[in-house]
């Protein structure tokens, strides 16, 4: 039994390394996808939606080509609506942050305000994260 511990340890290390790499890789992929979606990358969202429709509806190539411009137009309209409602969204966010800061310590309030700034930068596509 004593001679078998090295291969078992090696297998455990390899397995755990795979788990860690899988978690880190998945987190990075999801974070990037969410960032692109929040920033309004309509081409990215269009690809995601078309892939989902194709997967669920088993579309043929003609159907994919017919749906692409319909989806693109809808996404453009959503983008215009987001721009139109952005001032109201910002006002609600600013009010909520201000109201929450009243319940927080000054340091927590600064961190919350920083979170709100980062969200707006991410949404506007100007984030360096």
Image (tube, helix red, strand yellow):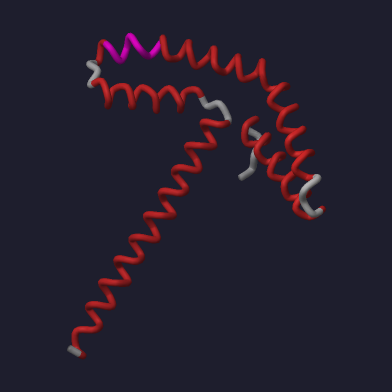
Q: Residue furthest bottom?
A: 2
Horizontal side of residue 82 vs 18, given as left or right: right
- Residue for point 54% across, 16% down: 78
**Magenta-tinted stretch:** 63-69
Quarter in which the N terminus is drawn: bottom left
Horizontal side of residue 63 vs 32, given as left or right: left
How many numbered discs sit on the rendered protein? Answer: 0
Which percent across, then down, holds residue 43?
47, 23
Which percent across, then down, holds residue 58?
23, 21
- Residue for point 39% across, 58% down: 21
Residue 66 magenta-drawn? yes
Residue 52 magenta-drawn? no
- Residue for point 35% across, 12% down: 67
Which percent across, then down, holds residue 102?
81, 45
- Residue for point 66% across, 18% down: 85
Camera-side residue: 93 or 78?
A: 93
Quarter in which the C terminus is drawn: top right
> Relative to residue 59, is residue 16 depicted above or below?
below
Camera-side residue: 68 or 114?
A: 114
Is the stretch drawn in magenta largely helix, strand or loop?
helix
Q: Quadrant of residue 65?
A: top left
Horizontal side of residue 40 vs 120, given as left or right: left
Which percent across, then down, holds residue 75?
49, 16
């Amino acid at each position: 039994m004593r001679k078998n511990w090295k291969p078992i340890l090696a297998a455990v290390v390899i397995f755990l390394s795979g788990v860690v790499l899988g978690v880190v890789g998945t987190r990075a992929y999801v974070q990037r996808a969410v960032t692109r979606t929040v920033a309004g990358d309509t081409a990215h969202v269009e690809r995601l939606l078309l892939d989902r429709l194709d997967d669920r509806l088993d579309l043929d190539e003609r159907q994919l080509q017919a749906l692409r411009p319909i989806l693109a137009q809808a996404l453009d309209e959503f983008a215009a609506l987001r721009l139109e409602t952005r001032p109201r969204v910002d006002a609600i966010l600013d009010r909520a942050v201000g109201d929450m800061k009243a319940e927080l310590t000054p340091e927590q309030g600064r961190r919350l305000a920083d979170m709100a700034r980062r969200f707006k930068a991410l949404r506007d596509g100007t984030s360096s994260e």
